[in-house]
Amino acid sequence: MSRMCELTGKGVMSGNNVSHANNKTRRKFLPNLCRVTLMSEATGMSYRLRVSAAALRSVEHRGGLDAFLLKSGERDLSPRARLLRKEIIKKTAEQAAA
């Protein structure tokens, strides 16, 4: 499993450690990933995702997993999150028609 957020696409970045003597060595900046269970109101199910702490704050700010996925573009999402987004769109369309 790669070190990448399933909702925002945030991944590993590279850079330099710079010492006091200005020596530069390569290093990695890892995202702060957390395994969380998020509830979908449209489907009524809970999903276990590996997301960054910043994405978790964004999900809460937008009003839940459904609102976050509907507002986000498909390019940033993982394949699993894309399927979840399509499922939520389908369920909300069914609920609106009923």
Image (cartoon, rainbow, N blue to C red):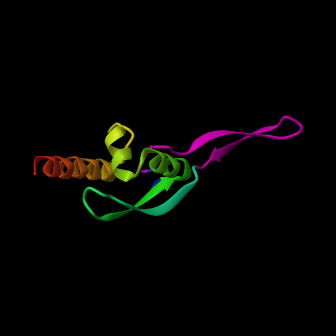
Left or right of 67 on screen, residue 3: right
Whole-percent x and y of residue 90?
18, 49
The quadrant in which residue 73 appears is top left
Image point 26% across, 56% down: which residue?
42
Residue at 58% of width from left, 53% of height from top? 32
Q: Which x, y percent locates residue 58?
A: 49, 46
Taking depth in this image into account, of 23 and 77 the one nearest to the observer is 77
Give the number of callouts: 0
Q: Is residue 21 magenta?
A: yes
Horizontally, residue 82 falls left or right of residue 54, namely: left
Quadrant including the N terminus = bottom left
From where the camera sits, is residue 4 visible?
no
Please state if 39 lies on the left or on the right of 87 as rendered.
right
Magenta stretch containing residue 98, yes or no?
Answer: no
Q: Residue 26 location in percent, x, y?
A: 69, 41
Which span of residues is magenta-colored? 6-30
Q: Nearer the viewer, residue 47 or 9?
A: 47
